[in-house]
Image (tube, rainbow, N blue to C red):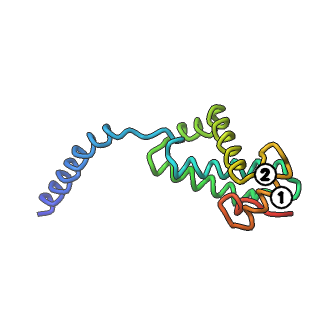
Amino acid sequence: MRHRRRWLRGAVLAGAVALAAPALAANPKLPLREVASLDRPMLWVGIAIEISNKCDSIDARTVKGLLFLNELKNQALAMGYTRTEIKEYITSKAEKARIRKLGESYVKSQGLDPTKTADLCTLGKQEIARGSQIGVLLREK
């Protein structure tokens, strides 16, 4: 009886793998930039870093930011992305430039100028007050 159960479990597992293989092959992983649940939070982190770098009255919550980035990395790994794919995404000059443009667009959408330090400070204070994802990565000095 045990042998039969083991064989049945093995057969079911083999069948599931056989059925899933074509589906996995037909649905390749999207580039990380196209996974909104990973890419959008990277934008928020980028904006928070820019604000903390430019605005003397606002600091980054470094530990909170690192924990948040680690959560994103773990989420990407759980989705099947490799450490190499993740590293290429976060170190890519093209991706950094794309995120910067998106960040500038976000600042402008708030009626502010991304080239003005005072406007970045204003945005930082607004985001902190709102408790947004950007705001929770920052703190006023």
The answer to which of 58 and 122 lies nearer the viewer is 122
The residue indicated by pointer 1 is 58
Q: Residue at x 69, y 40 (%)?
A: 100
Quadrant of res 83: top right
Q: Are marks 2 and 1 in contact (CB under 8 Å)?
A: yes
- Residue 67 location, x and y as percent? 65, 58
Q: Which mark is residue 51?
A: 2
- Residue 41 location, x and y as percent? 60, 52
The amino acid type, in three-letter code, at marker 2 is Ile
User: Dot 1, crowdedness within 10 Å: few (<14), some or many (≥20)?
Assistant: many
The answer to which of 126 and 71 lies nearer the viewer is 126
Q: Tag 1, which secondary structure?
A: strand
Quadrant of res 80: top left
Q: Residue at x 57, y 47 (%)?
A: 39
Name the side, left or right, on which 125 lies relative to 80: right
Tell me the quadrant of the picture where the N terminus can be found.
bottom left
Q: Tag 2, which secondary structure?
A: helix
Instruction: State how far apart marks 2 and 1 are (Cα).
Output: 7 Å
- Residue 75 location, x and y as percent? 51, 53
Measured along the vertical axis of the image, is residue 122 above or below residue 15? Answer: below
